[in-house]
Amino acid sequence: MGVSVANSVASRHVIKPTTNMNLEPKGPNPISPSSGSANTPTTINKPESTTWAFDLHLMSHFTTRTVYTFSSYPTLVNAWQTIIRDAVSQPFLLHGILAIAALHLASTPRYPDDDDDDDNEFTTHEYIRAFQYHQSEAIPQYRKILQSFDLIGDAEFDIRSREPWPAGPAYAMGFLTGMTAAAEVSDNSPSIYLEQERDGMTAASAITPPAHSPSMGKGARLEDIFDRFMSIFIATRGVRAVVKAALEAGTFQNTIYRHLIGPVKESDHLPAVPIEAEFSEWYDKFRTECLNDLASESSKREVCAAAITCLQEVHDGAARLLELKRERLGHVQGDRRLLYDFGWLLKWTAIVGQEFLALVRQRQDAALVVLAQFAAICKMAEDEWYMKNWVKNAIDAIRHMLGPGKAMEWVDRIVHRWAREEAVPGVIL
């Protein structure tokens, strides 16, 4: 009797998508840099599979699986599991959580020991539909929240009794948006699946690599990856002003959201860890020799030098955070790359100078090489699902933008030092 009732509930609420359901969004990709202005709404018809029962499945996966791919830091994981209560009354955050859970599931083989590829493909199809729907619901609402903040003397930062505190959910959504934008550069990009659908290609047990697409040549593919790479900066910088104002007001310290940035703040107060001399020597050489080779104008050298210094500080902070985790998570064994948080490395995309980003958009050689250095050090966090082949894809796109010459030689040196497959000795990687 119990089984019959359960099956009846599932049949009413978990509806498999039919083959004639269209995966295409009715509007631009909400996380693509080509998606138009911030005020442009994007709507997708609610897929039949996105019912309360299916969404409960996504939420369960987020709290028990996805959050552990964000960080190995227990307090941060617990914070993500706790803010679900705020998501209930903040729809943009709720949809954002469900979206990234669906993308995580779409990126993971369903039944690794099952030969039924059709069932695997069917499930991936279903999760991608759910991701597209929830993301299209989350982004317009999130933009409205950001636009509603008056960061000078706004009551949002003065009234402590209001629940849920709106800047906290906005920060959490900003993080999720940044992670989703980062996933677009990886082999687990949801856009890849949609392109494969258009091309009539059959998906396997999860999203398949973007090596070939009949409708897009190699050059166009690399340019598309580069654009998606740059969308990470858009995503992370969107919430920067909110976080800055909240930190200055001291309001994060009274909310669960303080744990989302806790490791970041804590690492800043750690004593300096012993760093191999090669680390400092590399960045010193990068600031001098590389910029002298590639930037003839002093103004451009200064901008790129500031970006390099900022990146060195973030890279150094990653080492400090690693030492903190080693001390507190001594029981963690295996590859130490699992202790790195990609979210920490994303800090650079949020704080690097706007003048530097302008040089990147102008395809200035020195700026692109600095961008390659950032991509290369992300190798330390590439074990997670949203980073599958991320470094290779990003570096290949940058190489395509550069072409042959001295800049390409510097990229080769960067890859050899920081992005080799084998482990590199020392604290940093």
Image: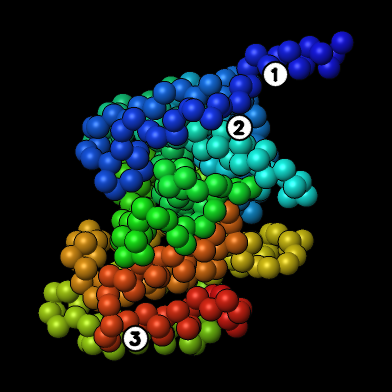
Local secondary structure at mark 3: helix
Q: Quadrant of the N terminus?
A: top right
Residue on which the image places disc 3: 409
Local secondary structure at mark 2: helix
Residue on which the image places disc 2: 58
Residue 410, picture quadrant: bottom left
Residue 173 placement, left or right of 427: left
Is 347 above or below relative to 92? Answer: below
- Looking at marks 1 and 2 on the same chain, the residue that comes earlier in the sequence is marked by 1
- Tell me what residue is drawn at x 35 percent, y 40 percent: 29
- Tell me what residue is drawn at x 53 percent, y 78 percent: 420
Is residue 384 at all visible to an observer of this figure? Answer: yes
Q: Quadrant of the C terminus?
A: bottom right
Residue on which the image places disc 1: 10
Relative to the observer, which residue lies in front, 117 or 380? 117
Relative to the observer, which residue lies in front, 181 or 279? 181
Residue 347, position as x, y percentages in the image: 41, 57
Residue 54, position as x, y percentages in the image: 61, 25
Is 110 above or below relative to 88? Answer: below
